[in-house]
Image: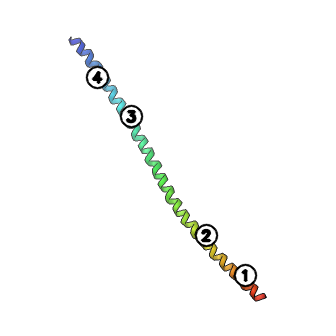
Amino acid sequence: MKQIFSVHDAVKECFDSYEKEVTRRINDDINARKSELDNLLKQKETREINRDAELKRLQTLEKNVFEHLQNIESAFSNLLTYYN
């Protein structure tokens, strides 16, 4: 009977070791994927910030171009009036 407990204990010890190793590997994999997802989220947030800044820059550029266009049209109109 003592031999049965020894076999049982040996098998239990093997499975306990296996469970610990599998659990460690799963946790390592989860942590690695979490880090990867955190990095992707940071990249996404950075690009969104850059997108907003670029949108503002383009809107300012559009406003400046429109102002220059108005100045040119006004100057052209003044020239037409002057020469007519």
Q: Is residue 34 above or below residue 62?
A: above
Q: Within 10 angstroms of label 4, few (less than 14), some, or many (20 or more) residues?
A: few
The image position of residue 43, as x and y in percent, is: 48, 52
Sequence-first tag of 3 and 4: 4
Label 4 is placed on what type of residue? Glu
Residue 76: which disc? 1
Q: At label 1, which amino acid type do we have? A: Phe
Mark earlier in primary sequence (1, 3): 3
User: In the displayed structure, does residue 53 sit left or right of residue 73?
Assistant: left
Secondary structure beneath dot 1 equals: helix
Q: Quote the CA–CA distance across marks 3 and 2.
A: 53 Å
Name the residue furthest left.
Answer: 2
The label number, if any, that marks residue 13 in the structure image: 4
Which residue has dot 2 on it? 62
Q: Quadrant of residue 65?
A: bottom right
Please name the residue shown 27% across and 15% down the image: 7
Residue at 63% over, 74% down:
66
Q: Secondary structure at mark 4?
A: helix
Cα–Cα span, label 1 and label 3: 73 Å
Alpha carbon separation for disc pair 3 and 4? 20 Å
Sequence order check: which comes first, mark 2 or mark 1? 2
Of mark 4 and mark 1, the one earlier in the sequence is: 4
Q: CA distance from mark 2 to mark 1?
A: 21 Å
* Depicted 70 relative to depicted 52: above or below: below
Assess whether mark 1 and mark 4 are in contact (beta carbons under 8 angstroms): no
Question: SS for tag 2?
Answer: helix
| Callout in the foreground (2, 4) | 2
- The reply, left or right, for residue 7 in relation to residue 45 is left
**Amino acid residing under circle 2:** Glu
